[in-house]
Amino acid sequence: MSEKLKEEVWDLERCTGCGLCVAVCNKGVLEFDESVDRHPTIKEFRRMVGYREVKIDPCKLCKEPGIEVCPRLVDWEPEKLGKIVSLRSKVSGDVIKDLLLCGLELGAIDGVIAVDLDKWNKKPVPKVFSHAEDLKNVPLLVPLFSAGLKLINRVRRKKRVAVVGPPCWAQGLKRLETSTMDVLEPFQRPEYLKISSFCSGVFYPEVLSKIEKELNVPLWSISDVKVNEKESEIVLRTQSGEATISLKELAGFMAKGCARCTDFAGEQADIAIGSIGSEPGSKTAIIRSQLGEELVMAAIKLNYVEQREPKLRAREEIRDFIEAKKKRESAVEVDKAFLALIKGLKKPVVDEEALKKLESLSGLKKRED
Ligand code: SF4
Ligand code: SF4
């Protein structure tokens, strides 16, 4: 039962928490409450057979689409940097929001999946937005662990949906888009415009209590949680101004799967956006597809965003950052070695079973003789 996800992703603490496997599980076997759990869990199914209650395995006859889409079950090759532009917001103060407003108002997209914050406890709440005005007070990108891709279940009837999240979400969607597994076809109907943030990692929701204590900021008063331009601090916008806390202080709350992640710059996204490579007040956008380019160009033309010059050393700065994150590759290698070891240890058990089978068969044969 989804053994591969359990052994190769969850048990090795490699889950990104994206939620895509839960969305595509058409038997409802996987569930995930990311405010409590670190990865999806498997529901138990039981049925009465006569007077006996037996455990049944609904995955037995299933193609297991969750395995097909999980971004952690493939090795991603590094992608070229793509086209780099620097953008300044002209409408909402947030470049990503301006691109989405442009897309929704033009009818180029008919839905957005992004993360909002709960009004009181400030836990991340992924939502589907269909109208430009709904995005008004939504932070869109918060560095908190959230299973936003669970929502692709709810956009199957839409034509083109922007999905705003960390690079691992774009990786999952890329696997979904390129799969030939028939049961995934309903999820492939909308075209996904993948917008990623530059990402050093996200934090489990308990980080909010730590921040509340350390900074003496009541959670209800926080309106936005962001990583600063140098990717070194978390910045909280509150009613009385801004408060910051260093990422190092919060390291213990970083999602375990992020320690195994080597994608900083949204390499599978249509557009990846972050601060590195641009002057303060502007954002760098790495454009990697025609769809991404069309939206950015339309937003510039229609004055949603203004095009600025990236820093002279923008490409080098981004490359340096990508290289720094690639150092996490050693953790990935350790995982692989560990997995090989586990599989190796299991082998004798499998062989023993095969041996027993063989013995019983030969026993039969003897009796027959
Ligand atoms: S990384 Fe995403 S798809 Fe893979 S097991 Fe975790 S939640 Fe599921
Ligand atoms: S560091 Fe990687 S795994 Fe973690 S949220 Fe960012 S993209 Fe996802």
Image (tube, rainbow, N blue to C red):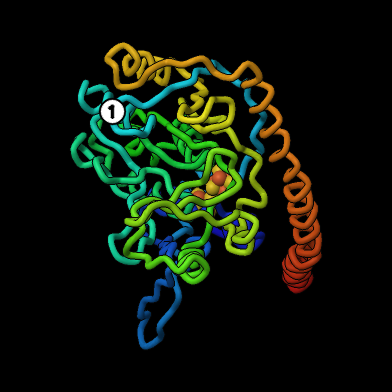
Tag 1: amino acid = Val
Towards the viewer: 189 or 95: 95
- Asked if residue 324 is positioned above or below residue 280 in the image, the reply reads below
Locate residue 98, reporting x and y percent.
32, 28
Residue 329 position in % (x across, y down): 74, 43
Residue 250 rendering spot, x and y as whole percentages? 59, 60
**Closer to the camera, 17 or 104?**
104
Q: Is residue 238 left or right of residue 68?
A: left
Can you give x and y, in whole percent of width and height, for residue 275 in the image? Answer: 53, 32
**Is residue 335 positioned above or below 85 on the image?**
below
Residue 232 visible at all = yes
User: In the rendered image, which residue does mark 1 sit on?
Assistant: 91
Local packing at callout 1 (Cα closer than 10 Å; few below 14, some 14-19, many 20+) is: some
Farthest residue in the bottom direction?
A: 51
- In the image, taking residue 338 as reference, residue 316 lies left or right, namely left
Task: Reply above or below: 252 against 49.
Answer: above
* Residue in the image at 64% along x and 34% along y: 76
129 displayed left or right of 279:
left
Residue 368 in sight from this viewpoint: no
Residue 304: name its quadrant: top left
Q: Is mark 1 within 8 Å of ligand 2?
A: no
Name of the residue lying farthest toward the front: 240
Q: Secondary structure at mark 1?
A: loop
- Residue at coordinates 29% horizontally, 49% vertically from top-left? 127
Query: Which residue is rendered at x = 27% and y = 40% of the image?
Result: 155
Quarter of the image that includes the C terminus: bottom right
Residue nearer the viewer, 147 or 122: 122
State the residue lying farthest toward the top. Answer: 301
User: Which residue is found at the position 48% from the left and 61% from the top?
Assistant: 40
Question: In the figure, residue 49 lies in which quadrant?
Answer: bottom left
